[in-house]
Image: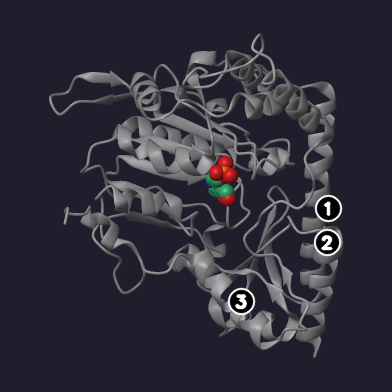
Amino acid sequence: MPRINEAFLNLQASYLFAEVKRRSQAYREAHPDARLIDLGIGDVTLPLPPAVVRALEVAVGEQASAETLKGYGPYIGYEFLRGEIAAHDFGARDVKLGADEIFVSDGGKSDAANIQELFAQDSVVALMDPAYPVYADANVMAGRSRPADSTGRYADFVYLPCTAENDFQPALPDRHVDLIYLCYPNNPTGAVMTRGALGRWVDYARAHEAVIVYDAAYEAYIRDSDIPHSIYEIEGAREVAIESRSFSKSAGFTGLRMAYTVVPREAQGRTADGRAVSLNQLWLRRQSTKSNGPPYVIQRAAAAVYTPEGQQQVRALIDHYMENARIIRAGLEAAGLTVYGGRNAPYIWIRTPAGVSSWDFFDRLLAEAQVIGVPGSGFGPSGEGYFRVTAFGSRAQSAEAVERIAARLRG
Ligand code: PLP
């Protein structure tokens, strides 16, 4: 038998969403007539924008003829898409990026998981707590931590608690760290980070020769005009930040798969003997070796998002989900719950009633309101006492879920 990578055995046993599914399934089997409303995992429910569907059809048609067939494409994505991304997602906000700094991929998840490959095995990793589980798990698989301790924190990571007490804004680390994962608008808390706070993180990274992996998967949901959309709006960020975005939640691409990561030319790491190395070139080398890029037809579909009709249709999708968020937030507040998020993000983060743990609240809502959410503690120990619901359900489901929860709380 071959020896395995034993770092995998350091992962915590249960993947959050698998446990949510297991409990929901058990309830369904015991109550076959129950009409469950799932505001848990956060997959989109509206169809793709018509401009995207049209672009897909045209691109599929091109594959039917030898003259227009597309085989292997550029490893990091077609220039037609990277150019649109640079112009619309960044240029429109006065952030200048070259197309060679944009790496198109099949998902924010894979980028968030893979980027750590560029850094040394003994890099110290800092994580927001709670956080999207991929950052921690990918670093555990890479051997950067021993198993979790009794509090659920991996022994070798630096955790940055984000709770209502600090307005879900992590304090700067009190020890040296090399790799910092920040996610804003945040999944799961729905919080955003101000320009000033983000500036302090960039300053920290510059002073400590750290790199910030900035996950902006929910950037399209920002409503407040003074909240930065990109970390590159902050002076000096090009030297120390890598930013990822996804088409999943902005344009409904969870099934099609499309995302990108920006690695600026100025971003550098160093060798053990102190030689500076371009992170852009390392990522280019990594992607060229391990990927042939996302499918051409999907890249054409993504480019359609930047046409005038695509932009307008995507805006309508986001507005729809944000109206769900408003309805959920207002309804739960009226029912007496303390809620956060939902204003610049498609997640509503609920404080569980006093003395009720995240999983107890999950079980209660499932049994008494037939509503599925996600226990906050599953995103990290500082998520204990919180509960996440998503705005990605249908309008009718969102409204009914709130009514059911309110009725239970009244009852
Ligand atoms: N980052 C965050 C914070 C997410 O919540 C998600 C999806 O849920 C992703 C990245 C990954 O998105 P995708 O792989 O669909 O592009």
Callouts 1 and 2 close, C-beta under 8 Å: yes
Instruction: Say which residue appears at 52% left-offset and 52% top-offset.
Output: 169
Instruction: Say which residue appears at 50% left-offset and 58% top-offset.
Output: 162
**Residue at mark 3: C-beta within 8 A of ligand 1:** no
Could you tell me how far apart the alpha carbons at marks 1 and 2 are, in whole angstroms? 6 Å
| Residue neighbourhood size for the residue with mark 2, other residues' Cα within 10 Å, grouped as few (<14), some (14–19), many (≥20) | some
Identify whether 212 is placed above or below 69: below
| Residue neighbourhood size for the residue with mark 3, other residues' Cα within 10 Å, grouped as few (<14), some (14–19), many (≥20) | few
Residue 29 percent coordinates (x, y) = 65, 83
Identify whether 61 is placed above or below 315: above
Number of numbered tags placed on the structure image: 3
Residue 26 percent coordinates (x, y) = 59, 81
Indicate which disc, 3 or 2, sits on the residue closer to the N terminus: 3
Give whichever of 220, 36 is nearer the camera.
Answer: 36
User: Which residue type carries mark 1?
Assistant: Glu
Q: Which residue is mark 2?
A: 327
Identify whether 221 is placed above or below 230: below
Give whichever of 213, 199 is nearer the camera.
Answer: 213
Q: Which residue is mark 1?
A: 323
Give whichever of 240, 298 is nearer the camera.
Answer: 298
Indicate which disc, 1 or 3, sits on the residue closer to the N terminus: 3
**Residue at mark 1: C-beta within 8 A of ligand 1:** no
Instruction: Say which residue appears at 39% left-offset and 22% top-offset.
Output: 288
Residue 105 percent coordinates (x, y) = 52, 31
Mark 3 lies on a secondary structure that is: helix
Callouts 3 and 2 close, C-beta under 8 Å: no
Give whichever of 145, 174 is nearer the camera.
Answer: 145
Q: Residue 19, which numbered label?
A: none
Q: Which residue is mark 3?
A: 25
Does the rendering let one see residue 188?
yes
Q: Quadrant of the C terminus?
A: bottom right
Callouts 1 and 3 close, C-beta under 8 Å: no
